[in-house]
Amino acid sequence: MPEAQVQPYARVREGVAARDRSLREKVMSLEEAASFVQDGMKVGIGGSTMSRTPMAMIWEIIRQRRERLSCSRCIVSTDGDLLFGSGVADHIMTSWFAQGILWGLSKVMRHHVEKLGKHFEEWSHLGMGMRFRAGGMGVPFLPMRSMLGSDVMHRRPEAKEVDCPFTGEKLLLVPALNPDVALIHVQRCDAYGNAQIDGLQFMDIDLALAANSVILTTERIVSNDQIRRAPDQTKIPFFCVDAVVEAPYGAAPHECYGLYEPMMKHMDAYVSQVNADPVGGMSAYLERYFYGPKSWNDYLALIGMEELLEASRKGRSIYND
Amino acid sequence: MTEGARYTAAEILAILSARQLRDGQVVFAGVGIPLLAATLAQRLHCPGLTILFEGGVVGAFVEPGKLPPSTNDQRCTKRANMVLGSADVLLLLQRGYVDVGFMGGAQIDRFGNLNSSYIGDPESPKTRLPGTGGGNDISSLTNMIVAMKHEKRRFVEKVDFITSPGFIRGGRSRAESGLPAGGMFRVITELAVFGFDNEERRMKVLALNPGVSREEVQDNTGFTLDFEARTAVTEPPTEHELQALRLLDPERLFTA
């Protein structure tokens, strides 16, 4: 399990200085963008639970059979199952890890943690948030008050309990988290990577600022003029972004705010299959939906037109009234 | 038990939980029964209740029949007042804007500590549970109502792991750990309503649910409970409450 190493400030700055932050087009394919994710890297994952999961990018990384990734996400759903089950990650840092509240415990997570010794490193939800935020702020830590007194804190020697220099009160300092690469899925961005997010933004802005590179997948690529018509909607600036990939339904079978809700029939079937047999069920699922399809569109076709249309009808209904 | 036929265990949990809320409060709710109970209170006696969700939602107004599958889904935001980042909505707890935190529980002990992380030794757990989510943050920073199933294996002398702190080791240990605000306020089960005494901070029975005896509560609890000399009996769910609840969850997602 990688230690929470807080880098000296000079290194944090060097990482940014070394990047090409010029205004340039960076549209590429999923296959090309996956080269930003190398074996053993720390990978930050955007969205939360079943929402705006960068599933297309995760799908591609699994297809390219990366290894030893250390992943972090505020709340993990079936994406965590797939990262463990495919063997690409051996460490997942999060506040909550199951398929979803409707389905109880993830047998896949349990199998990999209880039987195979993979690491599910638990922080409180705010703890994850303060770690990404410290990373995005260029400071080595942030103070917070939750986790104190709990065994969640006692299991995390990376966090330091201190007396406040101003009031003498107890505080918990949580270390900055600067992933090597962040995967973030958005509703739209331009070719430079100016990204607009509708609805719940979760921790994605802090994550984008904290990471040393960012792969954006997007439902659609719009012109820079479109972005400039509503600059208040731009949540991630282009100079944080290293790759832009157009991936329609890029969070499927999870949801993307305003466009589609989770594809619940697929999710139900997935959960039954992998919880009945966390090894064989997962390997059959990966074969059919991840390794088998020729393209992301093929994967969507396997989920099926009816599911996609139903999820879209529900997703768009948020703007109906 | 004739009362039992009128409603399910989950329904009485939701209704008794809703009764604990007061109009004008700001409530941070988890998914499932808490979300349902807070929404029910909003429809019944708390029209001015403000509901927060950890996905970043401020002022949620969940639609009947469209309960969200988690507190991080778009359904949580419809007709809300505001959406924030997840860290920012959690920071409202730390700043002190939230009156009540409201969540479910897997395992609880006599001091109201909750475990949702490990069954058995954390170094080699028998069962790895999903973890805290926002539970630790909510229970560390505000007054808690917990709605949960009453079983002996869930009500234990000491939890295997403190995921979400109650009064920790009782007495002043919570404040001394760095958590001067909040603490466990009520625990609601299908058998009884519980509070905590002000000194030792031990769990005590405030009121029995209709048709439930002291012995039944004690027999289903893994530690010795304190009872008031004259333990009250809760008013049964009214038809009005049951109807409003069933309207919210017609598919019985959370109330089966």
Image (spheres, rainbow, N blue to C red):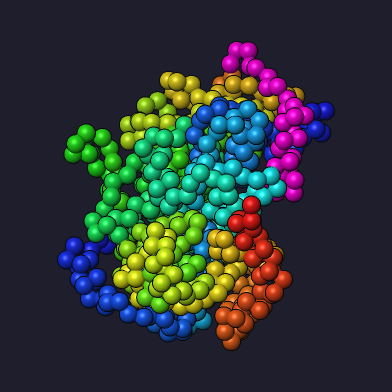
* For residue A238, above or below residue A164: below
Residue under the image location 60 percent in, 31 percent down: B47
Residue under the image location 23 percent in, 39 percent down: A163
Q: Where is residue B122 shown, x and y percent of the image?
A: 45, 52
Q: Where is residue A122 shown, x and y percent of the image?
A: 43, 54
* For residue B228, above or below residue A83: above
B211 to the left or right of A262: right
For the N terminus of chain B, which image quadrant? top right
* For residue A38, above or below residue A155: below
B8 to the left or right of A49: right
Question: Depth check: B213 or A7 in front?
Answer: A7
Magenta segment, which residues? B228-256
Q: Is residue A110 visible?
A: no
Within the magenta stretch, is there residue A87? no
Residue under the image location 50 percent in, 39 percent down: B28
Q: Where is residue B59 shown, x and y percent of the image?
A: 52, 41
Q: Where is residue B229 shown, x and y percent of the image?
A: 60, 12
Residue ranking furthest to the bottom:
A294
Within the magenta stretch, is there residue B243? yes
